[in-house]
Image: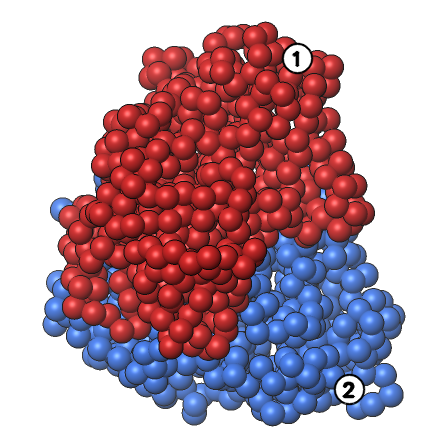
């Protein structure tokens, strides 16, 4: 008899979610993580002495409320929400703040355009309704299209509520908006660049495309559906950093009886008679299980943990064709004092700065930042997404000091000019120069900096091409196509072998939903 | 002056004429009113310079529905296509690539660049062929109303589901991908050679303000692939006597069935009484009456110019105002004193086909980035044809007619000054770029006609110069073209119909919208 019911490869947040659900259901679960800490890309690390930094995933994440509730995480981890959803300084020294409160935001928007202020509540209402439908899709196991089984239809019934609330007249809006560019969508509602940029930036934060590209309205909706703010992005921080969240997940899994081992690198999945029977570690050690689940990305899962010869040529071709394409760098700064934004001069800035900060003054600005990636160049005027987590959680840094973490777009995985190592610091300089246009004191308060380019994210965190989502969140890699059609239901052609990472539906973000959905399917199969 | 008809068609473009021909064939008394002095809309031939026939806008034919050719007996009325067997691509390094229709030649040429690509080519064609067949029946559907589906609409949706299940998983999944991917990503799954991806990618961007690397362009590629079907003719081709000959053939068929066609008769408005269309008023004040009025114009003209807002529901007005046009292409037509010389040309027979200026994927993408914020590409991507090589009626002996389709030209070119200056600057960019590949071109020019998107709007009536009467993006296709609930050729005004490329199945000289509209008007039977 196998030593375990299930072995999970990788203790990223999805692997931990799957582990927790399976252990909760009474399965004997072993999680194997090759790094010394759990969390994968959702970790807190002491990059600078005394500073606890969420190196890759940041903020309060997008962890599904359902997962949070069912795994009883509230007792284990605290999030500090922020009232500000996006603080957006403008090149002319003004600023636009998007608050959780719609009315308060409308008043802000009115400073830029009265018409936009009137449109904003309507836009929020429509998008929230559509996002509810998208959210419903996310928790579904995709049907094996073009076939739809009775069970799929029953699962689809979960969408009826959201669709009814959207209303029949607006179903065409849903169908029309999904494949659109976010820029076109926002242009239909708003006229002020600042407003369009503030909302549109979120549509491309985790994707390689610019907001003018088709499919980015879907990424906006996907973010909207999972944000927990009722708006286009989440806002707040996890107390103790992202690592506290995955730490809580690990504790929850352990609490349900799962065994988690770090520093245990799986070199291969053992397959006998076309069935996964266990794993072999790089130490040579072997463990057997009735089922093996990979939290790694599809390329790693099928090419490294398994071998291409297990699969037919169509399968291999489809895996080969998965688009990864990381396009952002992560830059962490240790600060001796808060940056002083020109737009907030003279007042108490802490309220506005405690949420996400966006340098994305217009859709054209973001699009132009994107254009260069097509030619293997990094942006000269990058679109920046910033967070100062120490304003919400001072314990993350020595007293009086701050962390500024930046997602800097766009930084393509491959540079035409050659190796990233030669350009890493100059890109960071560009980022800081850009920031200095909005917060002129920034250079004077930086005491340390740490730069992670897409190749760094690949080598350090196992994110191929530096893509945080284990594959782009584009429409051709969506739903029944994610990561490839024959694995979209979390199963693989090898019996007993499953996937549970962000490469599976519904994709990236610290949502836990792929892990949740995978656990559901594994439990169905093992009943 | 008043006269009575069963049906009046506004606009003598190829779809309007097709609709007219089918209605006349069914015994209706039909009047077609065209604003210009010549028929055809964007499918038009004109003698702009003495002795030379210009295919002013549209310059190749391939998507024309075979059932239309058959049912309207177009061959009898002058339809004659000279097939276009090759695409010649001069490259920046002095080499060239030619895409041949002939399989042996194609394989040899692919193999000159990459043996792997030569092998993939047949797989690629097979996949495209399968997908084109998969999409083909959809072209024949009247798009269902998804807000309030009728029994027939539910039937259509059921048929569609059945059809999709019948495709097999591999084709279905490939179809899902091609609907949303970028042309270059899609091609990159088959080909490794840059110039091969570039020339194939060109079909994905024609008439679309998107780059080969923008998601959504793979579908446009498929749209253009559908012409390679059905055996009526197997590739792209040039109509004898210019593209206007297609419109003339359809008009000939319509006239033969008794339709009356008037040119220089611009319609000012559709006359609506008690929610029903009852006739049209011309700009000169003449009025004509009929129970059925059909607009072949684009959605903006159909809903926002020819009728009044008060006669339309607010939802529809909003949808029509959101409909995207964004013309992306211009046209330069040249009367030439002789054949241009391409130093990279080895096989002179390829001048019978198309010459594509798209030496690399990066070249096309740069051209796009150059124009997408306004203006035009300084080094544009272009498709050049010299129809006079195969059709001597196009130009005097020894002389040639050259048609240059140019991507990208934005509707807004205001950075270049007034309209004349814009046209001049745009034309110069085109000719300067072409002369990089054919250095003697400037010495050969006897006359040039330059059309910017604004010119296409002013002269032909295409809003923002969009050659498809609205972008062919997923959010504007099938039951969303031009607006949900009104994709079945009807309008909220009783007796008022639409039949232009702004309706399903969209742009190109397909005659599909005209035929489907006629079928709906005639109660489902042609």
Q: Position of residue B202 (x, y in %)?
A: 50, 35
Q: Foreground: A236 or B466?
A: B466
Q: Position of residue B436 (x, y in %)?
A: 70, 21
Q: Is residue A484 rendered to the left or right of residue A377?
A: left
Q: Foreground: A106 or A145?
A: A106
Q: Is residue B512 rendered to the left or right of residue B337?
A: left
Cα distance in 3D space between marks 1 and 2? 71 Å
* Quarter of the rendering containing residue B189: top left
Q: Is residue A239 rendered to the left or right of residue B241?
A: right
Chain given the colour red? B
User: Mark 2 sits on what residue?
Assistant: A349
Quadrant of the drawing holding the C terminus of chain A: bottom left
Depicted A160 relative to depicted A426: above or below: below
Query: Same chain for marks 1 and 2?
Result: no
Q: Position of residue A382 (x, y in %)?
A: 70, 59
Image point (38%, 67%), residue name: B277
User: Mark 1 sits on what residue?
Assistant: B337
Q: Residues within 10 Å of mark 1 (few under 14, many from 20)?
A: some
């Amino acid at each position: 008899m196998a030593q375990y019911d299930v072995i999970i490869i990788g203790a990223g947040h999805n692997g931990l979610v799957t582990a927790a659900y399976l252990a909760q259901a009474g399965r004997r679960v072993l999680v194997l993580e090759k790094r010394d800490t759990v969390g994968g890309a959702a970790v807190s690390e002491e990059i600078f002495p005394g500073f606890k930094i969420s190196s890759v995933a940041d903020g309060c994440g997008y962890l599904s409320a359902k997962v949070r509730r069912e795994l009883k995480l509230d007792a284990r981890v605290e999030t500090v929400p922020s009232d500000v959803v996006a603080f957006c300084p403008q090149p002319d020294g003004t600023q636009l703040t998007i608050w959780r409160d719609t009315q308060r935001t409308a008043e802000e928007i009115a400073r830029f355009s009265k018409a936009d202020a009137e449109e904003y509540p309507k836009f929020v209402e429509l998008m929230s309704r559509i996002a509810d439908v998208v959210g419903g899709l996310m928790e579904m196991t995709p049907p094996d299209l073009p076939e739809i089984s009775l069970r799929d239809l029953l699962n689809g019934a979960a969408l009826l509520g959201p669709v009814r609330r959207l209303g029949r007249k607006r179903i065409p809006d849903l169908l029309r908006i999904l494949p659109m560019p976010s820029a076109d969508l926002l242009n239909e509602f708003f006229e002020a660049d600042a407003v369009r940029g503030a909302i549109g930036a979120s549509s491309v934060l985790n994707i390689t495309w610019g907001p003018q590209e088709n499919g980015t309205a879907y990424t906006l909706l996907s973010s909207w559906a999972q944000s927990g703010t009722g708006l286009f992005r989440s806002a707040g921080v996890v107390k103790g950093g992202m690592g506290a969240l995955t730490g809580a997940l690990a504790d929850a899994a352990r609490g349900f009886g799962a065994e988690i081992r770090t520093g245990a690198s799986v070199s291969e999945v053992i397959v006998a008679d076309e069935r996964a029977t266990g794993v072999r570690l790089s130490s040579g050690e072997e463990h057997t299980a009735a089922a093996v689940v990979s939290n790694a990305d599809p390329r790693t899962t099928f090419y490294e943990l398994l071998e291409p010869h297990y699969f037919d040529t169509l399968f291999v071709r489809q895996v080969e064709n998965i688009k990864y394409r990381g396009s952002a760098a992560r830059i962490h700064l240790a600060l001796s004092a808060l940056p002083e934004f020109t737009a907030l001069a003279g007042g108490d800035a802490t309220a506005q700065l405690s949420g996400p900060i966006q340098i994305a003054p217009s859709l054209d600005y973001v699009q132009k930042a994107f254009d260069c990636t097509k030619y293997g160049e990094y942006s000269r005027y990058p679109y920046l997404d910033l967070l100062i987590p120490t304003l919400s959680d001072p314990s993350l840094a020595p007293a009086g000091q701050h962390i500024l973490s930046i997602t800097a777009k766009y930084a393509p995985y491959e540079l035409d000019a050659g190796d990233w190592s030669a350009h890493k610091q100059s890109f960071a300089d560009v980022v800081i120069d850009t920031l200095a246009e909005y917060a002129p004191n920034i250079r004077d308060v930086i005491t340390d900096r740490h730069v992670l380019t897409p190749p760094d994210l690949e080598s350090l965190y196992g994110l191929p091409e530096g893509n945080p989502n284990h594959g782009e969140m584009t429409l051709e890699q969506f739903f029944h196509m994610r990561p490839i059609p024959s694995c979209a239901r979390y199963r693989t052609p090898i019996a007993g072998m499953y996937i549970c990472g962000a490469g599976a539906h519904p994709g990236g973000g610290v949502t836990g939903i792929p892990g949740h959905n995978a656990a559901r399917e594994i439990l169905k199969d093992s009943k | 002056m008043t006269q009575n008809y069963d049906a009046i068609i506004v606009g003598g473009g190829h779809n309007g004429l097709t609709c007219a021909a089918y209605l006349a064939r069914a015994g209706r008394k039909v009047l077609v009113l065209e604003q210009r002095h010549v028929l055809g809309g964007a499918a038009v031939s004109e003698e702009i310079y003495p002795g030379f026939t210009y295919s002013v806008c549209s310059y190749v034919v391939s998507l024309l529905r075979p059932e239309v050719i058959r049912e309207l007996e177009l061959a009898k009325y002058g339809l004659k296509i000279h097939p276009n067997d090759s695409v010649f691509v001069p490259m920046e390094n002095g080499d060239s690539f030619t895409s041949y229709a002939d399989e042996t030649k194609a394989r040899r040429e692919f193999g000159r660049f990459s043996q792997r690509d030569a092998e993939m080519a047949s797989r690629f064609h097979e996949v495209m062929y399968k997908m084109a067949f998969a999409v083909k029946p959809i072209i024949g559907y009247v798009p269902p109303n998804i807000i309030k589906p009728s029994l027939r609409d539910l039937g259509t949706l059921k048929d569609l589901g059945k059809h999709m299940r019948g495709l097999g998983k591999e084709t279905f999944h490939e179809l899902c991908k091609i609907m949303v991917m970028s042309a270059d990503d899609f091609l990159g799954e088959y080909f490794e050679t840059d110039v091969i991806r570039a020339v194939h990618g060109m079909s994905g961007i024609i008439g679309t303000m998107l780059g080969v690397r923008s998601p959504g362009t793979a579908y446009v590629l498929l749209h253009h692939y559908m012409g390679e079907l059905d055996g009526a003719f197997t590739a792209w081709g040039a109509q004898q006597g210019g593209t206007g000959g297609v419109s003339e053939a359809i008009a000939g068929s319509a006239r033969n069935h008794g339709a009356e066609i008037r040119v220089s008769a611009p319609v000012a408005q559709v006359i609506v009484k008690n929610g029903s269309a009852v006739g049209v008023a011309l700009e000169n004040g003449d009025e004509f009456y009929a129970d059925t009025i059909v607009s072949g114009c684009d959605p903006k003209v159909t809903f926002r110019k020819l009728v009044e807002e008060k006669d339309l529901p607010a939802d529809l007005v909003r949808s029509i105002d959101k409909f995207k046009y964004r013309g992306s292409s211009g046209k330069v037509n040249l009367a030439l004193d002789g054949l241009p010389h391409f130093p990279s040309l080895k096989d002179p027979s390829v001048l019978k086909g198309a010459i594509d200026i798209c030496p690399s994927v990066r070249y096309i993408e740069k051209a796009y980035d150059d124009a997408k914020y306004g203006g035009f590409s300084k080094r544009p991507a272009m498709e050049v044809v010299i129809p006079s090589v195969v059709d001597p009626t196009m130009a005097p002996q020894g002389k040639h007619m050259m048609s240059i389709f140019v991507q990208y030209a934005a509707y807004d070119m205001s950075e270049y000054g007034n309209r004349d200056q814009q046209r001049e600057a745009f034309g110069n960019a085109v000719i300067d770029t072409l002369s990089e590949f054919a250095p003697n071109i400037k010495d050969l020019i006897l006359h040039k006609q330059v059309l910017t998107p604004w010119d296409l709007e002013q002269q032909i009536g295409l809003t923002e110069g969009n050659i498809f009467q609205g972008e062919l993006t997923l959010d504007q296709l099938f039951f969303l073209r031009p607006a949900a609930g009104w994709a079945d050729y009807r309008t909220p005004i009783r007796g008022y119909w639409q039949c232009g490329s702004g309706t399903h199945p969209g742009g190109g000289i397909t005659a599909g919208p005209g035929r489907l509209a006629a079928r709906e008007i005639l109660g489902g039977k042609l």
